[in-house]
Amino acid sequence: MENQIDNFVKNAYISAFDTDSDIIKMLMLVNTKCLIDDFKQRYLFVDNNRLRDELRYYKFYGAEYNGENLLNIFLPVILGNNDGEKCDKELVELVKKYVMYFKIENKYSEYLIATLIYSELIHNLLKNPSIEYDEIMDMIKERVVSLNIDMEKSHVVKFQMYRIGIIKTIDEYKDGKRNSSSDICSGLLDAIFDIYVEDRDESEDINSIKKVLFSLLGQKISTEIENIDFVDSMAEYTVKLKKYKINKKEYHAKANPLEIISLNEGDSIQDPILNKLTVKSKIINGNLLKINVHTKSGEYCFRFAKKS
C-alpha cells in the first residue's frame, strides 16, 4: 500500500508538468525546493527565507502572470504532507504570500478555499482512490462549511460571502448542474465533474488539474514533458520528503540575483538558489540585458532592465 501511495504521489507531481504553463512548472519547482521535512513534528513546512530569495530570482527570469489558474503550484505542499491539518496551515500562509506577490488580492478567497478543497480531495484520494462522486461532494462541502481561518478584517466579509456562494455551487454540482462561473473553485469543481460524471474538452487550466487527479486514480501519465529526468528526480525528492528522509536544513543565506550581472559568458558559479550555474550568453538589447544560464534544473533567461 505504501509503495502504491508513493507511486501515486510521484505520478501526480509529474502530471502537473504536462502543461503549457511555464509559471506553474517554475513555481512548482520553487515551492518544492522550499520544503523542510520536520521529522519531530511529522509534517512539511515552507522555508520562508528560501521562498523570499526564490521569488526575488523569479522576478527576473519568471513567466508573467496572465490570469491563469495557479492551483497546481501548491501541489508540492499538498502531496508532500501526510497530516492534512498541518498541511492546510501551511497552505493558508502560502496562498496569502502568492496573491500578494502577484498582486491578485482580489482572488484571495477563491485561491484560499480552492486550495483547501484541493488538499482535502487529494489526501482523501490517496487514502481511498475508489471514493464515489457523491462522497467527494459531501466531503468537500463539509470542509468548506467547517472552515475557520484567522484573517485580516478587510478580507472577512468577502471571504464569508464567497464561501456561502461556493457551498451553494457544490450542491448544484452534486445535483449534476454545471456552473458557468470562471472562478478558481468552479474550475476545480469542473475538473472533478469531468472525471466522475461527464468528461468534456476544457481549458488548459482545468486539463492540468484533471491530469493530476487522473494520475491519483492510477491512470498512466504522459512522458512528453520537457526535462523529464529532472522532473522525475524532483518527484522522487518529494516522496522522500514525505517520508522525512531528506532532513532538509533551513536556508540562512542571502542571495542577490543582481550579482549575476557581473558574470561573463562561460563563467560558472555555485549560486545559493540555482546551485551550479553557467552563463551561456549575455545580450544587450536597448535598455534590456538578457543573461541565459544553464543549471541542473534547466535553462533560465534573466532579464535586467537598465534604470533610466
Image: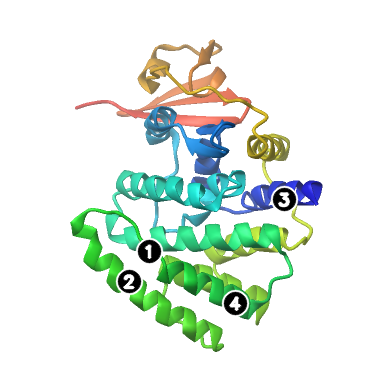
Q: Mark 3 points at which residue?
A: 11
Q: Is residue 244 above or below residue 255?
A: below
Query: Could you tell me which secondary element the residue under label 1 belongs to?
Result: helix
Q: Are marks 1 and 2 in contact (CB under 8 Å)?
A: yes
| Residue 108 place in picture, x, y as percent | 33, 58
Real-space Cα separation, disc 1 to disc 4, in angstroms: 18 Å
Query: Could you tell me which secondary element the residue under label 4 belongs to?
Result: helix
The three-letter amino acid code for the residue at tag 1 is Glu
Mark 3 Cα shell of 10 Å, populated few (<14), some (14-19), many (≥20): many
Q: Mark 4 points at which residue?
A: 193
Query: Could you tell me which secondary element the residue under label 3 belongs to?
Result: helix
Residue drawn at the location 54% of the way across and 45% of the way down: 77
The three-letter amino acid code for the residue at tag 2 is Tyr
Real-space Cα separation, disc 1 to disc 3, in angstroms: 26 Å
The scheme the figure's colours follow is rainbow
| Residue 178 place in picture, x, y as percent | 51, 84
The three-letter amino acid code for the residue at tag 4 is Phe
Q: Do the residues labelled 2 and 4 touch (CB within 8 Å)?
A: no
Q: Name the residue under label 1.
A: 110
Residue drawn at the location 28% of the way across and 60% of the way down: 106
The three-letter amino acid code for the residue at tag 3 is Asn
Q: Which of marks 1 and 4 is nearer the N terminus?
A: 1
Q: Can residue 21 be seen in this view?
A: no
Q: Which residue is outermost to the front?
A: 40
